[in-house]
Amino acid sequence: MKTKLVPDTSVIIDGRISEILRREKGEIEVIIPDIVVSELENQANLGRETGFDGLDELNLLRKISKESNGRILIRFLESPRWKETRYKNDELIRRIAEENDATLVTSDRVQALVSETKGLKIQYIGSKVRRIQPRIFEFFDSRTMSVHLKENTEVFAKKGSVGHFKLVRIGTVIKREELEQYAKEIVEFARSDPNGCVELEQKGAIIVQLNEYRIVITRPPFSDGLEITAVKPLARMKLSEYNISDRLLQRLEKGAEGIFISGAPGAGKTTFAQALAEFYLSKGRIIKTMEQPRDLQLPDVVTQYSPLEGSMEKTSEILLLVRPDYTIFDELRKTHDFKVFADMRLAGVGMIGVTHANRAIDAIQRLVGRVELGMIPHVVDTVIFIDSGRIEEVYELRMVVKVPHGMKEADLARPVIEVIDFETKRPMYELYSYGEEVTLVPVNLGHVSEPERLRHIMKTKKLIILRSEKYRNENVQVFADNEYLFTARVNRAGNIKVKRNSKEGIALLESIKSGKTIRIENEG
């Protein structure tokens, strides 16, 4: 007796019908409703992998039918037009199965339950579970940050450490057909693995998160060829592993409520944000995130939110009800991102924003025009600039009423935002309104004595001794090139003694080893 099957869209996308046909030995007739083909065509036109997977499955079914010598028949059934206006697709597929006395095959749990309720013959086989990891993971090792595959080109990877990556060739030219298989493996695994998900799927692009891997698949017309880029975070650090002063640590713990983490792509912003989140967790704070896609690697206790119905504004409304102590907003780029960030901060939520910037001051300027000038210090009070995985600059912002730097008349006094170097307490920039424009002015207030370059550095078993010819009985700041290391006291003999195994000593030894110039200047 011939077996009749009517598959719905879900089971064709999963590739389960071809598995059934290979497994069954009797005569089989597969009735494929035209609305299923239309749905797959529509998804493929939108650039979605599900559409391409389904069309590939239909071509495979025709091939299996041809090789079966008449045992397997594939029949495409055109639905009567009047039915299309009366019923939704799932209902129409059920009616086709009923009218042809066929078994409805689905991997959609809801479709199976409804069909069973209506007394239809049903075969529910569940979503396909891929147990073998995608082959793209084989390209990664402990020094690989990202892998880049594009049709008709060689396979490349970025290898190295944070801030010191190099693009190297790791594979021969890869053809379109093979790359399609890579894409199919990735999407199938993401849909079946509990730790995987499809973050975004639009025409010509799909973003997948698999454990710590973020994978972007693009295809024409969005890109000029099929391309797969997979990125994996290399470093996971604790806040104590950074060159962070006790003063900054205390500010982060007790004072900072609006924090910008800025830096160039690949500089280590995300790694620092993760370290900061775990630091706050250790202090008993409730942490949430806002991400698209979600690629921060955080403990399970941290809930990571994506845009609700495509809107971060709607996500923020939920978060205001959840009332976290701190929310990490990853990848602030667009105007509405900064406005949502500002709205949540002014509502009393501690905010940590991650944004691209080539300098620390550039991150502050991205708020200009998006947030009212006088509100900027209330939205962001601390800016941390990361470069090559290290903290290079820290600014704090404060509002004062004064005559701007460079002006003399008292009646020119106005609200001014001072951007201050956190460690040295020196004003670096001033922001204020001048006419209808917002002006940013670099400042150098007060006389600062010339720094002293240290030429005499002695190392003992337990100490590093810096010899100063200029300072006695003064507090000074120690720098390596232009990087602030720590503040110390010069004794009456002109020496600064630093313990080798202290945080300051380790940083100093590392700087000396790197060939950096060690200099000091008075704290004032």
Image (cartoon, rainbow, N blue to C red):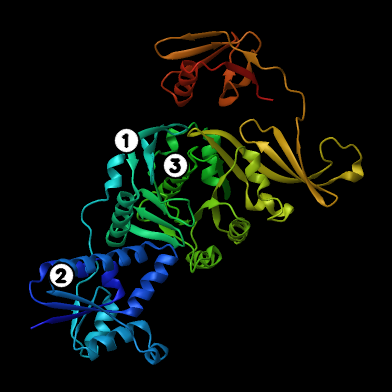
Residue 196 placement, left or right of 117: right
* Residue holding disc 3: 271
Q: Is residue 302 visible?
A: no
Q: Which tag, 1 or 2, sits closer to the chain's start?
A: 2
Q: Position of residue 359 (x, y in %)?
A: 62, 37
Residue shown at 11%/68% (left/top)? 23
Q: Which tag, 3 or 1, sits closer to the chain's start?
A: 1
Residue shown at 50%/12% (left/top)? 465
Q: Secondary structure at mark 1?
A: loop
Quarter holding residue 35: bottom left
Q: Which tag, 2 or 3, sits closer to the chain's start?
A: 2
Q: Nearer the viewer, residue 274 or 253?
A: 274
For the residues labelled 1 and 2, the Cα–Cα distance comes to 42 Å
Q: Is residue 1 visible?
A: yes
* Residue holding disc 2: 21
Name the quadrant of the N terminus: bottom left
Q: Secondary structure at mark 3?
A: helix
For the residues labelled 3 and 1, the Cα–Cα distance comes to 16 Å
Q: Please state which of the two labelled residues, at mark 2 or mark 3, is closer to the viewer.
A: 2
Q: Position of residue 29 (x, y in %)?
A: 17, 79
Q: Amino acid at mark 3?
A: Thr
Q: Amino acid at mark 1?
A: Ser
Residue shown at 35%/55% (left/top)? 300
Residue shown at 58%/19% (left/top)? 489
- In the rendered structure, find residue 142 and report the number of the disc placed on it: 1
Q: Position of residue 143 (x, y in %)?
A: 35, 34
Quarter holding residue 287: bottom left
